[in-house]
Amino acid sequence: MIELIKESILFNCEARIEMDEKAMYVPVGNGTETGLIKFLQDAEIPVHEIIKRKLNKIQTTIPFSSIRKRSVVAMHLPDTDMVRIYVKGAPEVVLHKCVKTFSVDGSKSHLTDEEINYISQDVIYKQFTSKGLRTLAFGYKDMSLDEFNDIKERCNGFAEEQDRDVLEQNLIFIGVFALEDDLRDKVLRSVQYARKGNLTVRMVSGDNLETAKQVAIKAGIVTEEEASKNRYTCMSAEEFRKLVGELRRERDNEGNFKLSI
């Protein structure tokens, strides 16, 4: 399990390791990924050595996007004829693509609906997102190199979204991480000044709705009462699109993108 956690963080990752002026290995890149790498470094795990193992071994990469809410890396495991598919992303997406998990004794067991509900509600919601923590789930599955190459050929090299689905099904659930983003200095004071100037501040976030609510409350953008009682104060992207009509992204005559209803 520990090896799977380390691999999931370091192999399905675009952040890199650099040496600073003090000859220390430091992660550079996306804030979420560098935070997870620092977590491993604090546990005295030689991340710079582990990352080297993925060089020339990556078979396919499907990057994270705000629409997909997950990223995928297929890696040829060194010295084997196996390919491991690493999936990470929003728990509400990744968790429902998993069919197995690990028991206390380390064996794999079927992931039941009751367990999924427990993870979603008792762990992710009650312990993490309701406290403003960002969450990230990890899953994986193995297949032979021949099977992977056959699927890749049949699925158009995973070029389109419908081609990629086969890589993300029947996963084994590894776990969920919770990360805390501290508010930047002066954010609360700036929001208060804006209110005094009759400026309305609104926050747009790619995070889980409950996480975003708690951050908005801490920043003084909304009150706890507003967030809990008015359904239009805080809403998901899906709810917003339904409310204003489906938004479409189109190019104008000059090639620039614009949004239209």
Image: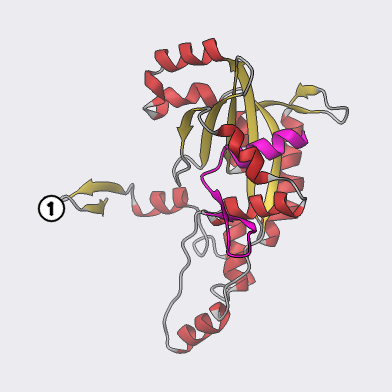
Residue closest to the far right: 105
Residue at the disc numbered 1: 254
Residue 64, percent from left and from top: 48, 42
**Numbered range of the magenta stretch:** 1-28
Q: Quadrant of the N terminus?
A: top right
Out of 9 and 239, give the one closest to the viewer: 9
Residues 231 and 9: in front is 9
Q: Is residue 127 left or right of residue 171?
A: right
Measured as percent of width and height from the top left, residue 133 is found at: 66, 58
In this rendering, is residue 26 above or below 7?
A: below
- In the rendered image, residue 91, in percent from the top left (x then y), is placed at 62, 42
Residue depicted at 46% across the width and 34% down the height: 62
Side (left or right) of 69 relative to 120: left
Q: Report if residue 8 lies within the magenta region.
A: yes
Residue 107: image x %, image y %?
A: 82, 23
Q: Amino acid at mark 1?
A: Glu
The reply to whether residue 211 is in sight is yes
Q: Within 10 angstroms of label 1, few (less than 14), some, or many (20 or more) residues?
A: few
* Residue drawn at 52 percent across, 61 percent down: 234
Q: Secondary structure at mark 1?
A: loop
Q: Farthest residue to the left: give it.
A: 253
Work out whether residue 137 can be spotted.
no
Identify the residue shown where x is 51% and y is 65%: 233
> Along the line of sight, which residue is nearer the eye, 18 or 212?
18
From the viewer's perspective, tell me whether residue 143 is left or right of residue 195: right
| Quarter of the figure with residue 96 | top right
Q: Residue at x 63, y 68 (%)?
A: 182
- Report which quarter residue 86 is drawn in: top right
Based on the displayed image, in which of its 4 quarters is residue 93 positioned? top right
**Is residue 215 magenta-colored?**
no
